[in-house]
């Protein structure tokens, strides 16, 4: 997999580049600011760009903004944002859309998990940090999620994080068939439409959980820029 | 009036004054027909004094060449000099020396009106020329006719000491005398009336000028009253008693008129006038009291003794101060009404502030009202610079500086820029010094607290960044290094590395939680996401109701967030609440945060949440806490 890394901390960048190389990925560029990152992505057409959210020049969410622009100009490039803490400004409407991931930086240390997330994102799937999903689930727990059993909530959270049925089954020590049964139950109880495609069910679940703060009660996927684009994506193999 | 005309007239007055003086001086030195030095020299001071009028006249002519006041002033002295010269003629019998002089001497007793002619003209033309209208043009001719009548009536009369000899006793000459005196009186009344009318219809400057003349008048009345007291109380000779008043007329009037024309803004004439008028009334009233007591005591004891004077002095001393205080207030209200009313308003306000009835911040509005200038601005000294009442920094303003304990605490700007207006404003400002200083201190306190809060907020942000971008990054980088080393290790050592990495991850999570406590990074996403994240981590159900919000700066953002945190924590810890509601809304451009719970209530409203209250108030907000027993607690903060 060809990867572009954008990360301003040299220590972290070098470590990441080595880890990626060890895992067999080809790091085609590793830069320290948002502008060079955008430029390299445009020139090198990688499969994936890994970007720190806070980067020069402004040390605000420059990385996230650059990612949004990359999404506009090169929709086929997978985007994985890394951050020290949860900060969804400027990337909220990408959360849950295909080919997008958002992880806390320390997830890098779980090599297998991290590699799995990289591949999912590069393949047009989704990888959302459990921390984000947990806060969304907790926020909704008091109302809409009351109808679900604890196990169903666990399944729902893993779906939202972007895992496939197989991955969920492995994590929960269940059979894949049981996971699918739970899924159907969850979707029926919440009134969501299940169409089988993993990347679309992630978006449905994330939107339901209310990643968008202005519409905490939105039940169905609403005006979501990522949606429209996802149908335009080509050459994305199904999971 | 043309400048040349004014100069010629003034020159004439100078000659009219100089000839008698020169003559008397010449005669005093040379002596004539048995009249020696002492006889003429005795007149010299009296002849010289009107020179003050002449000098003042010249001063006015120089500075304001077209004003008729200069010549009129000079002639006030000139006329007095001429009248005196006539007196000298008649009293010393000099007219005997030459045959042509006899008729002058015969006419002299009727020509005493000359004494007042200059003053009459001065009153008519001061300060900017004769008034429009036939009546005023008629005054001087009528005065001339009256003088003629008096000359005819008193023809041939001789002065002997202080009495007239050979005056009219009956017949048409008495009638003529009566008509003449009545006309003279009418002319004087008309002159004074002209001045009064002028004052009433005049503008600010004219009034100020007339007030100077009034000041001189009040001084003369005071001197006369004092002379009267001396004369009846202490049997002083008439010359000693009334001399000062007469000299006062010749000196005070020209001085006042000259100042009025040349430099009417010289002193606070309103105040001088008001005070001298007050003293005049006090002196007259004391004199009356004195006289009455003397009269009463000598009636009772029916003999003259030291007792009556002592008693009178005692009683007068007793009533003097309270009398003067009351008279001052009354006179100030009457004579200088504007200033009195304005000052009273400011003083009342200052008293209200002291009593806690009004807020000191109203001081600017009160000064505007009192100074009748809606554009007036009050600036407060703050550190090295200046701020307005809202605490906005301003560049060094112009205006009247107010000091308090030796330090400049405020500067007041007003569009009214005359020296008098500035003096008045300074006086008003002094009356308002305490409220102004209170405003300044309060503002300084708020600004200081706001700076502190701002610094704290910035510091929190910096600390949070340092934790995230410094320590956390390094720990993770170390973890990555360990992971790379792990590849070549056997199972047992690899497990050790797993443990080490897990430790690092735990530390990173701890640092993240610590940074969150310092400043939740979700605030970067805005207040609402941060509150939603808080809801996610609150153990009891929390309703979040968010309306459209105004734009928030970092301080407001963090303050609002911390208000909610603190109130919710309080509900959890002390109120035994099972449900908490958070409402955030825009209230007229201000951020309103309300946290209510269903707990036991009864929070100590004054002492509860002190830190919260401090925090909100230091950024200019307000906190209301209501906590009825058993009725839950509601904390409302408006930022």
Image: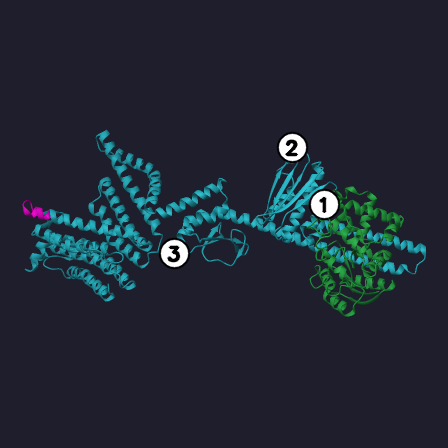
Chain colours: A green, B cyan
Is residue A51 toward the left or the right of residue B546 in the image? right
Provide the residue designation for mark 2.
B629
**A144 left or right of B175?**
right
- Can residue A132 be seen here? The reply is no
Whether pointer 3 and pointer 2 mark residues with C-beta atoms closer than 8 Å, the reply is no
Residue B264 placement: quadrant? bottom left
Would you say B338 lies left or right of B46 here? right
| Residues shaded magenta | B166-177
Say whether residue B169 is magenta: yes
On the image, the x and y values in percent for residue A102 come to 77, 56
Marks 3 and 1 belong to one chain = yes
Instruction: Report how far apart the C-alphas of labels 2 and 1 lie in the structure.
Output: 26 Å
Numbered circles on residues, count: 3
Instruction: Determine if residue B189 is in view.
Output: yes
How far separated are the C-alphas under marks 3 and 2? 63 Å
Residue placed furthest toward the bottom: A43
Q: CA distance from mark 3 to mark 1?
A: 66 Å
Check disc 1 and report the residue beneath it: B535
Chain to which mark 3 belongs: B
Residue designated by label 3: B419
Does residue B367 appear to the left or right of B490 in the view shown? left
Chain of the residue on which disc 2 is drawn: B
Q: Quadrant of residue A100?
A: bottom right
Residue drawn 32% across the image and 49% down it? B273
Q: Residues within 10 Å of mark 1 (few under 14, many from 20)?
A: many
Label 3 or label 2, whichever comes before in sequence order: 3
- Image coordinates of residue B83 in percent, x first then y, are 16, 55
Nearer to us: label 2 or label 1:
1
Q: Quadrant of the N terminus of chain B?
A: bottom left
The picture places residue A12, in percent across and down from the top left corner, at 80, 61
10 Å neighbourhood of mark 2: few (<14), some, or many (≥20)?
Answer: few
């Amino acid at each position: 997999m060809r990867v572009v890394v954008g990360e301003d901390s040299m220590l972290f960048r070098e470590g990441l580049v080595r880890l990626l190389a060890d895992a067999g990925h080809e790091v085609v560029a590793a830069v320290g600011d948002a502008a060079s990152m955008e430029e390299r992505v445009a020139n090198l057409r990688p499969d994936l760009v890994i970007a720190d959210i806070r980067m020069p020049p402004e040390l605000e969410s420059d990385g996230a903004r650059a990612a949004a622009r990359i999404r506009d100009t090169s929709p086929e490039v997978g985007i994985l944002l890394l951050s020290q803490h949860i900060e969804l400004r400027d990337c909220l409407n990408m959360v849950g859309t295909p080919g997008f991931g958002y992880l806390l930086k320390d997830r890098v240390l779980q090599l297998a998990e991290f590699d799995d997330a990289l591949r999912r994102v590069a393949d047009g799937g989704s990888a959302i940090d459990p921390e984000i999903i947990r806060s969304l689930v907790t926020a909704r727990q008091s109302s809409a999620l009351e109808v679900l059993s604890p196990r169903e909530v666990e399944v729902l959270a893993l779906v939202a994080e972007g895992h496939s049925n197989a991955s969920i089954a492995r994590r929960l020590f269940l059979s894949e068939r049981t996971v699918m049964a739970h899924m159907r139950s969850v979707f029926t109880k919440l009134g969501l439409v299940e169409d089988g495609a993993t990347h679309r069910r992630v978006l449905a679940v994330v939107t339901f959980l209310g990643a968008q703060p202005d519409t905490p009660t939105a039940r169905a996927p609403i005006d979501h820029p990522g949606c429209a684009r996802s149908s335009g994506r080509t050459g994305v193999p199904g999971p | 009036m043309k400048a040349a005309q004014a100069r010629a007239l003034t020159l004439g007055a100078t000659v009219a004054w100089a000839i008698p003086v020169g003559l008397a001086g010449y005669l005093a030195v040379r002596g004539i027909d048995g009249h020696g030095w002492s006889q003429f020299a005795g007149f010299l001071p009296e002849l010289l004094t009107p020179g003050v009028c002449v000098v003042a006249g010249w001063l006015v002519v120089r500075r304001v060449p077209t004003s008729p006041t200069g010549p009129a002033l000079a002639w006030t002295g000139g006329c007095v000099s001429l009248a005196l010269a006539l007196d000298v003629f008649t009293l010393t019998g000099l007219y005997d020396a030459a045959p042509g002089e006899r008729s002058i001497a015969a006419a002299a007793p009727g020509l005493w009106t000359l004494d007042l002619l200059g003053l009459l003209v001065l009153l008519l033309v001061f300060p900017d020329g004769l008034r429009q209208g036939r009546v005023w043009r008629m005054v001087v001719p009528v005065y001339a006719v009256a003088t003629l009548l008096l000359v005819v009536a008193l023809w041939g009369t001789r002065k002997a000491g202080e009495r007239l000899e050979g005056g009219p006793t009956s017949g048409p000459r008495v009638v003529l005398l009566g008509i003449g005196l009545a006309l003279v009186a009418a002319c004087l009344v008309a002159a004074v009336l002209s001045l009064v009318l002028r004052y009433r219809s005049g503008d600010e400057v004219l009034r100020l000028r007339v007030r100077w003349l009034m000041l001189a008048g009040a001084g003369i009345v005071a001197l006369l009253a004092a002379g009267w007291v001396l004369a009846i109380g202490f049997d002083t000779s008439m010359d000693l008693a009334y001399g000062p008043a007469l000299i006062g007329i010749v000196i005070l009037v020209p001085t006042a008129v000259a100042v009025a024309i040349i430099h009417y803004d010289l002193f606070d004439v309103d105040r001088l006038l008001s005070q001298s008028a007050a003293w005049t009334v006090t002196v007259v009233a004391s004199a009356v009291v004195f006289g009455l007591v003397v009269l009463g005591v000598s009636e009772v004891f029916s003999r003259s003794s030291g007792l009556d004077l002592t008693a009178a002095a005692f009683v007068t001393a007793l009533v003097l101060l309270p009398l003067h205080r009351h008279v001052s207030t009354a006179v100030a209200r009457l004579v200088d009404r504007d200033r009195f009313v304005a000052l009273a308003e400011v003083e009342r306000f200052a008293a209200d502030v002291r009593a806690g009835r009004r807020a000191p911040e109203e001081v600017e509005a009160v000064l505007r009202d009192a100074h009748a200038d809606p554009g007036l601005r009050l600036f407060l000294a703050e550190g090295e610079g200046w701020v307005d009442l809202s605490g906005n920094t301003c560049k060094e303003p112009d205006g009247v500086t107010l000091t308090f304990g030796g330090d400049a605490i405020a500067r007041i700007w007003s569009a009214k820029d005359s020296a008098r207006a500035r003096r008045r404003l300074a006086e008003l400002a002094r009356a308002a010094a305490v409220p102004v200083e209170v405003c300044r201190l309060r503002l300084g306190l708020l600004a200081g607290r706001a700076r502190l809060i701002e610094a704290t907020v910035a510091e929190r942000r910096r600390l949070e960044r340092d934790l995230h971008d410094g320590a956390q990054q390094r720990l993770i980088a170390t973890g990555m290094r360990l992971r790379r080393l792990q590849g070549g290790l056997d199972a047992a050592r690899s497990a050790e590395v797993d443990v080490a990495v897990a430790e690092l991850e735990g530390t990173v999570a701890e640092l993240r939680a610590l940074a969150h406590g310092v400043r939740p990074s979700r605030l970067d996403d805005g207040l609402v996401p941060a509150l939603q994240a808080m809801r996610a981590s609150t153990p009891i159900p929390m309703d979040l109701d968010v309306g459209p919000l105004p734009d928030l700066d970092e301080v407001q953002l963090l303050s609002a967030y911390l208000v909610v945190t603190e109130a919710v924590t309080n509900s959890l810890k002390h109120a035994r609440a099972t449900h908490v509601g958070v409402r955030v809304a825009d209230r007229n451009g201000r951020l309103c945060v309300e946290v209510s719970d269903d707990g036991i209530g009864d929070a100590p409203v004054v002492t509860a949440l002190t830190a919260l209250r401090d925090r909100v108030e230091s950024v200019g907000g307000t906190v209301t806490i209501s906590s009825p027993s058993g009725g839950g607690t509601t904390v409302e903060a408006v930022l």
